[in-house]
Structures are given as C-alpha cells and as structure tokens.
Image (cartoon, helix red, strand yellow):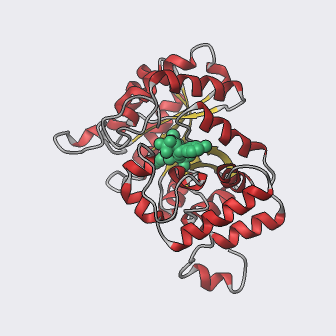
Amino acid sequence: MTFGESRTFMRGVTSPDDEARRVFDRAIDAGVNLVDTANVYSEGRSEVLTGEWIAGKRDRVLLATKCRFPMGMSTRGVGPHAYGLSRKHIVEACEASLKRLNTDRIDLYQVHMQDRLVPIAETLRALDDLQRAGKIVYAGCSNYAGYRLVESLWQSEVKGTLRFESVQFQWSLACRDAEREVVPACREFGLGALVWSPLARGFLTGKYQRNQPPPAGTRLDAWRDSFRAYDNDKMWALVDVLRAVAARHETTPGAVALAWLLAQPVTTSVIVGARDEKQLDDNLVGASLKLSPESLSELNAASQLDWGYPYSFIAVREPW
Ligand SMILES: NC(=O)c1ccc[n+]([C@@H]2O[C@H](COP(=O)([O-])OP(=O)(O)OC[C@H]3O[C@@H](n4cnc5c(N)ncnc54)[C@H](OP(=O)(O)O)[C@@H]3O)[C@@H](O)[C@H]2O)c1
C-alpha cells in the first residue's frame, strides 16, 4: 500500500519509488515471501511496480492482490460493473491485475470486502473459473463479517466450487474486534489468517506521544480520524505497557506488537507496512522475537476487548 504515488487514501504517505524498491528487495532478501497488493493501491501503480520488481524473483514470492473497489475508490461517475463482486467485474479486474503485475498467475486472489448485492454463489463460481483457467492459484477474502464468511464456506461446499482459503483482516493490540467472529472462524475452519495494519498504522511503534499532535508527514498526521480513534486513555496506557515490555526485551514497541500477533496460534502471516528501509529493519526484528508468558499476559490485559453480548455471556461458561 506504500508503493507508488497515490491520488487517493494514501496520498502523501507512500514511499518514493527508489526507496520502495529498496524496501522490496531487502524484504525478499530477508526471507519475506508474501507480497500483498491490490488493484486500487495508488490507482494501479502499486501492482505495476510490484510486477517490475518481482521479475527474477517470482518463484520466491507468494503474490497476493485484490479486487472489489472501483479504481480511484469512488463510485461516482462509474457504472455498476466497475466495482463489486459480480462475475463481470471479477473477471475484468483479474485480467487488468495480471497485465499490471506482468505475470500469468496470481497466487492468492482476494476479494477486498464482502458485497451483499451479489449472490455469493456467483462470486465463487467466477473465482472457480479463474482458478480452472490457471489465472489464480488460490482465492481468499478480506473484510468479511462472520456470517458472510461462514455462508461463503457453506456455499462452496454445496455448489462444489473453490472456497476462500484465507481471510485478511485488521488485527493488532489496538484493534482486537476480529477476535469475536473472524479469528474463531479461521481456527474452526482451517482458514489462513492474514493480518493487516498490525502496527495500527504506525501507532504501536511508540512514535506518537500523548498530548502531542502526530509528527508531520506520518500516516496518522494524514489520517486524523484514525489518530483521534487512538487518542484516548486506554490506547496511551497500552503504549506505556508496550514501551515497558520492549525495554525488558531490549527491543522496540513495534517489534513487540508484531511478536504478540505472531504468538497467536491462528496467525498465518502478518502483512506489515514499511515506508523505508529503517522501518523494515525494525519490523523484521518482530519475526524472531519470543515474548515471555508474563509479557504476553501484560499485553493481553492492556488491550482487552469489551466483548459485549453474546461473547461475554458464553465466556462465563467456556473459553471463547
Ligand atoms: N485488506 C485491507 O482492507 C487492507 C487494509 C489496510 C492494509 N492492508 C494491507 O496491509 C498492509 C499493511 O498495512 P499498514 O501499512 O496499515 O500496516 P502497519 O504496519 O500497521 O502500518 C504501516 C505504517 O506504519 C509506519 N511504520 C511502520 N513501521 C514503522 C517503524 N518501524 N517505525 C515507525 N513507523 C513505522 C509507517 O507509516 P509512516 O512512516 O507514514 O508513519 C508505515 O507505512 C498494506 O500494505 C496492505 O497490503 C490491507
């Protein structure tokens, strides 16, 4: 999402192309093997750059992209087939992504968000056809409500089509809502759990300070609504705990936040963002960091969800 100059939601917070290229090369050299992009990231430019840079490394990388949203992110002035999960849009979006990525197959083709206007069976059949044609290897989904995810799995079984093999969802110490429905669904149905915004868009690196505006040029300077959502006592107390745990493990708060996710049995992969090489190096430390049981329980306590009904009702009698 940090690749290519963006005119939409990532405006001003992506990396210059030469820096992004260094991040990409260094990540692959360090053993990172999942690259996640989407047709809409920097209006197609992220896929074009990924396609250029992956040349010669294609077989070392699990290449994942997505479709669903209109290019440019706005539905104004575009027809109903320019977005969504209809057969027409999925097939056209896939062809366009293959061209931009300069490859003949997408390893993991993900639908970017559920679409209630299209029958699930139509979406799954279109993806199944793409798989049979060899254009995609696996299909996954992202940003699904629990009921829709499970209904998709059920429809796959009933209709004999491919199924979503993975779910990509927001999960971090600052956002644990997915633990109500999607995380248990991954555990119960053996789905790959791919985590997005594992650092809460940078908030969990500890670079933001209580009672101070976000540093100029950062993601949360550009995304003030997100900053406001984190700017509360619970989140600042969490950052204090992260800093204390990081000091005890002689590492950074960001590495601790990533290690907490990797310590969750359901996590398949953590899709971390890095705007420059220094950030990437900091974040790679998280991959090998093992947190002590005491540190894990401190972090769990500081980030505890307000479960709500029926989860808190069930949890009285059995673990959720
Ligand atoms: N499926 C979806 O709907 C969805 C949604 C969002 C993201 N994603 C995927 O998830 C990926 C990661 O998302 P994300 O970028 O939001 O994840 P993130 O890792 O939570 O945030 C990354 C941002 O945090 C800051 N940062 C990262 N490491 C840092 C460090 N060591 N020190 C200081 N600052 C640091 C950088 O922003 P600044 O330097 O600008 O502050 C960086 O761009 C995306 O590239 C995309 O592939 C998917």
Q: Is residue 92 visible?
A: no
Instruction: List x then y, in percent, for residue 131.
Output: 53, 31
- Which residue is at 72% across, 52% downward? 259
Question: In the rendered view, would you say 140 is above or below 52?
Answer: below
Nearer to us in this view, 175 or 74: 175
Instruction: List x then y, in percent, for residue 190.
Output: 68, 53
Image check: 14 left or right of 206? Answer: left
Image check: 149 left or right of 45? Answer: right
- Which residue is at 61% across, 63% downward? 239
- Which residue is at 70% across, 55% downward? 266
Please identify the residue farthest to the top as the structure is shown: 56
Please identify the residue farthest to the front as the structure is shown: 212
Question: Hey, which quadrant is residue 174 in on the image?
Answer: bottom right
Instruction: List x then y, in percent, for residue 99.
Output: 42, 20
Question: In the rendered view, would you say 187 is above or below 192?
Answer: below
Image check: 107 left or right of 218? Answer: right
Question: Hey, which quadrant is residue 8 in on the image?
Answer: top left
Quadrant where the C terminus is found in the figure: bottom right
Image check: 273 left or right of 250? Answer: left
Instruction: List x then y, in percent, for residue 30.
Output: 72, 29
Q: Is residue 155 visible?
A: yes
Question: In the rendered view, would you say 228 is above or below 82?
Answer: below
The image shows a total of numbered marks equal to 0
Nearer to us in this view, 250 or 11: 250
